[in-house]
């Protein structure tokens, strides 16, 4: 599981969003717009990654208890890290869904393009800030986990 791949794909798709214009819808509900199709693909990939991560988190929660408090702390840090990662993916998926919805609104109401674009820009700014906050939290957890892991492993070498 490549941690950064969905984020990079999403950001790339969102950047490409600014370059795309409205297009005619294809039959069967599929969009003729390659940006919308890429956004849908990103959503599908995130759905799969979120499901997989939820299973992984459930497995971590079902692990048998251990007596060593440092190992307990490591497990708690792992669980917290994966839960933050899950929040990032959910946030990203919701932003992609919002973007698809905004594109559909522009296609349905071309006269509202400016107002809808403003809504999208405001949401994009909030999204970037939220992602940065989650990244900072994950980095803090990863540093703490490294410290605790070093303590646990260090006991074998002293």
Image (cartoon, rainbow, N blue to C red):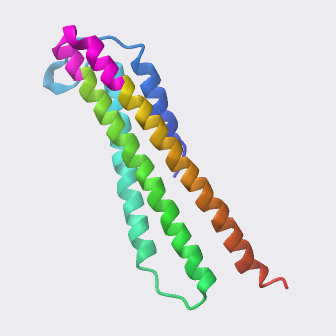
Outermost residue on the top side: it is 111
Residue 17 horizontal side relative to residue 73, left or right: left
Observer-nearest of 15 and 114 = 114
Residue 43 x, y percent position in the rendering = 34, 39
Q: In this view, does 79 lie above or below 100?
A: below
Residue 128 horizontal side relative to residue 51, left or right: right
Residue 10 x, y percent position in the rendering = 44, 34
Residue at 42%, 55% in the rendered image: 86
Tell whether position 87 is magenta: no
Q: In this view, does 11 lie above or below 53?
A: above
Outermost residue on the bottom side: it is 67
Q: Is residue 130 above or below residue 1?
A: above
Residue 148 horizontal side relative to residue 99, left or right: right
The majority secondary structure of the magenta stretch comes to: helix
The quarter holding residue 45 reads top left
Residue 6 visible, this orientation: no
- Highlighted range, magenta: 104-120
Residue 127 x, y percent position in the rendering = 42, 36
Number of marks drawn: 0
Observer-nearest of 59 and 99 = 99
Outermost residue on the right side: it is 158
Residue at 42%, 73% in the rendered image: 59
Residue 135 horizontal side relative to residue 115, left or right: right
The quarter holding residue 158 reads bottom right
Residue 122 x, y percent position in the rendering = 37, 27
Residue 39 visible, this orientation: yes
Residue at 43%, 65% in the rendered image: 56
Observer-nearest of 148 and 55 = 148
């Amino acid at each position: 599981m490549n941690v950064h791949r969905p984020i990079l794909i999403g950001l790339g798709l969102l950047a490409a969003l600014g370059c795309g214009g409205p297009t005619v819808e294809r039959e069967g509900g599929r969009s003729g717009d390659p940006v919308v199709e890429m956004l849908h693909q990103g959503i599908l990939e995130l759905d799969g990654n979120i499901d997989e991560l939820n299973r992984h988190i459930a497995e971590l929660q079902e692990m048998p208890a251990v007596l060593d408090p440092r190992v307990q702390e490591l497990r708690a840090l792992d669980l917290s890290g994966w839960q933050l990662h899950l929040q990032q993916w959910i946030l990203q998926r919701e932003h992609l869904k919002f973007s698809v919805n905004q594109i559909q609104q522009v296609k349905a109401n071309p006269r509202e393009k400016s107002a809808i674009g403003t809504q999208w820009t405001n949401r994009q700014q909030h999204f970037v800030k939220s992602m940065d906050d989650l990244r900072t939290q994950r980095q803090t957890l990863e540093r703490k986990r490294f410290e605790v892991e070093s303590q646990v492993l260090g006991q074998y070498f002293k």
